[in-house]
Image (spheres, rainbow, N blue to C red):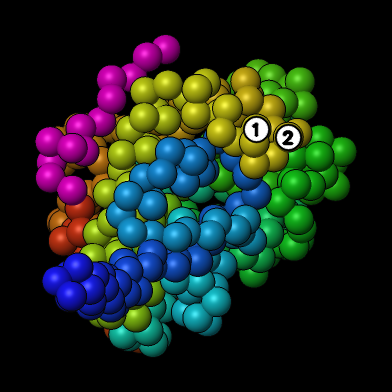
Amino acid sequence: MRRNFLRATLGALAGLVVASATPAFAQSAPTKIRFTLDWRFQGVHSWYYLAQEKGYFKAEGLDVTIDQGEGSAATVTRIMSGAYDAGFGDMNAIIQQAAARPGEQPVMVYMIYNQPPFGIVTKANGPIKSVKDIEGKKLGGPAGSATTRMFPAFAKANGIDASKVEILNMQPNLQEQMLIQGQVDGSLIFTLTSYMNLVGMRQDPDKDFRWITFGDHGIDVYSNGVMVSQKLVKENPKAVEGLVRAVNRAMREAMANPAEAMKVMTKVEPLFDASIEARRVQYAMRTVMIGDEVRKNGLGDVDDARMTRAIGTVAEAFSLPRQPAASEVFNRSFLPPRAEREAPALTN
């Protein structure tokens, strides 16, 4: 009898353990996040896949699906449509949407391109020798590209009549090819994309091409970073914090050893040129990712005064109905502590 009583008691306790464990298990199910890139696979996307490969997303309770993009500005509209929860895209497109549809725009939570990689590349022996030569010429650029979207601001800042510039919509993978073939006089590009694409095409980007960067011609704005939907911020701030923490961790690792990080990308895309893409990461670090401001504030953050000026630049250039506050478009509350966001030293 005593043995039967013990069996019954133990059985009841086991049932209670299972019953109590079931809800806890359900609550620990990972949060699904649909994440869109700005472009096709490049070395500067390696940290997202590294975070996935090494389980950094999983450790934060996240199940992240990563898709290729159609342009930095398109990332914003993809998130606003509800198709994606987060992505890597352009701050200036957020500003435009915040002015037109306040409260619906995504919020950037981790700045990556501290300097804008927007520019125009022309052939050194082509008809565009200076900024003023752009009028009356034909430029090529994808409609969803942040550079194409920012061209009116660039034109206004430099006294160019944008109506006298023909913009040919083209696929991003054709930009350098069509420029080389003379089908356009210049291409509206991301410098860090086109520069390395030309290297991959066995061109000399320094000798045979001329680069007109927006940042050097009156457009002191921020560019790409990690953004999230308003819905995700409100409903699951812990998921946003975990996403940012995982990306920050993986990005620092990728910057410290780009060649190693590219091994992950070759698993994603077998045709991935690891050597070229490792150089792209290093080029990005030197030109758009790490400068005095980042060394001071750490990776992921911005300077509030500069952000306010940048918003004013965009608002004026696009005749926006209102000028959003910096807090509407950038939220630093999800950033890891400053000690965890130290920028790596640059090497030649």
Q: Which residue is drawn at 69% across and 40% down?
A: 269
Q: Where does label 1 land, which residue?
A: 266
Residue 293 visible in the picture: no
Indicate yes or no whether the magenta region holds residue 215. no
Q: Which residue is drawn at 20% across and 32% down?
A: 342
* 100 in relation to 210, above or below: below
Give percent across and percent down for residue 2.
14, 71
Q: Residue 270 carries which label?
A: 2
Give percent across and percent down for residue 141.
68, 56
Quarter holding the N terminus is bottom left
Give percent across and percent down for residue 170.
77, 58
Which residue occupies the foreground of this view, 303 or 75?
75
Q: Is the magenta stretch mostly helix, strand or loop?
A: loop
- Magenta highlight range: 336-348
Helix, strand or loop at label 1? It is helix
Q: Residue at x 49, y 41 (%)?
A: 53
Discs 1, 2 touching: Cβ within 8 Å = yes
